[in-house]
Amino acid sequence: MPRFRKIDSEPADSQPGRHFSPKPGAPAAGPTASQVPPAPAAAPQATQAQRPVSVPRVRPVQPAYGAAATEPRTAPAPAPAPAPAAGGPSKPPKKKRRARDIVSTVLIIVGILLLVAAAGIYIHAQLGYQEAQASYKELEQYAVADGTGDNIPQVNFDELAKINPDVVGWVYVPNTPINYPVVQTDNNDTYLYKLFDLSGNGSGSIFMDMDDTAPGMVDQQTTIYGHHMYDGTMFKYIDDTLKQEAFDTVKTVYYITREATYKCTPLYTMQVQDTYNDARVPNFTEEGHTLQDYLKDGLTQAKAKAADAEQRIDSAEKVFTLVTCAGEIIPRTTRAGMVCTIDEVTPRA
């Protein structure tokens, strides 16, 4: 209920009929009935001009706790939802946010699993490299350098045959990691994933093509294979010689058998498709497809070559070819083949 502030206008005494005072000497009991003046007539309503111009200020009064309100009250209208900020994205529905959270969690888990798998593969590869290097390092005791010139190994084939009777030779390229025994069997698969001691390992062994005549250097072409290993071992350096600067560092390649030591000189390194069969043909006997025809065709696919390659092709009678996978991207569909001519043969005592 509003409470009004008292407003003072004229003094009470100046308004007739508002205040009465007894006459002097009048009895205290009050006037008699005859003396009572007639009731004043109702005061005329004030005109608009006579009304006070000040307006009372109203303060809302809250009802006491538990008291009923004297005026009806209506429930406040619900506040409207805030409008999204101009130009800003509105929040996605709760279900969509939950779906996004689930997808994000799954992707994080998958990413972690892939990292763990990659780490496992890397560790496994490193352990395999170490095992292979240790195994072949131990075999070097059976191929002692002679201490002269290129330090050509003096190979003890009898001891090597006790470890693996498939041994046919030894390949050595000075100033490179290539210094390995060579094996041969009736297929080209066995030694892809077996070390010389026949233990399983991704580094495999250096092996001669199954169709070549053992111990090698008997046919027009003797082909040996080795893996392209990321740690630089086996025949990784053969792939490197697709670049001329690396090719020029290889002056001599040695192939050693029980009977002789063969000194070979690189002719060129070609890059061919893995279906290029001529790289493994032992003898070129078909008319119109001679050894010289093969060598000239390979020269057209060479990435690096000797300065006198064309002249040496005409006089070549036998070649020694070292083959590995080309490039760093897996799967590798091309092969690097270093073709060497045989310049000198030294019989072994």
Image: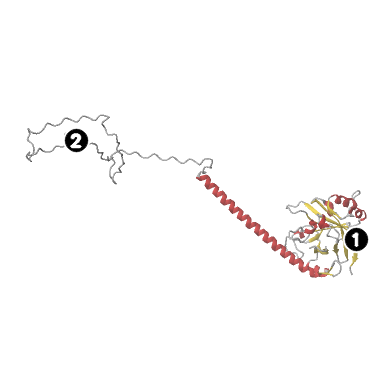
Q: Which residue, given by chain and number where applicable, does mark 1 sit on? A: 343
Q: Residues within 10 Å of mark 1 (few under 14, many from 20)?
A: few
Q: Residue furthest right?
A: 315
Element on which disc 1 rests: strand
> Distance between the Cα atoms at labels 1 and 2?
150 Å
Q: Nearer the viewer, residue 94 or 258?
A: 94
Q: Residue furthest front?
A: 24
Q: Residues within 10 Å of mark 2 (few under 14, many from 20)?
A: few
Residue plotted at (74% across, 64% down):
132
For badge 1, the amino acid type reads Asp
* Upstream in sequence: badge 1 or badge 2: 2
Q: Nearer the viewer, residue 25 or 271?
A: 25
Q: Which residue, given by chain and number where applicable, does mark 2 sit on? A: 14
Q: Position of residue 45 (x, y in %)?
A: 22, 30
**Quadrant the N terminus occupies:** top left
Residue plotted at (90% across, 60% down):
343
- Report the number of discs: 2
Circle on res. 41: none
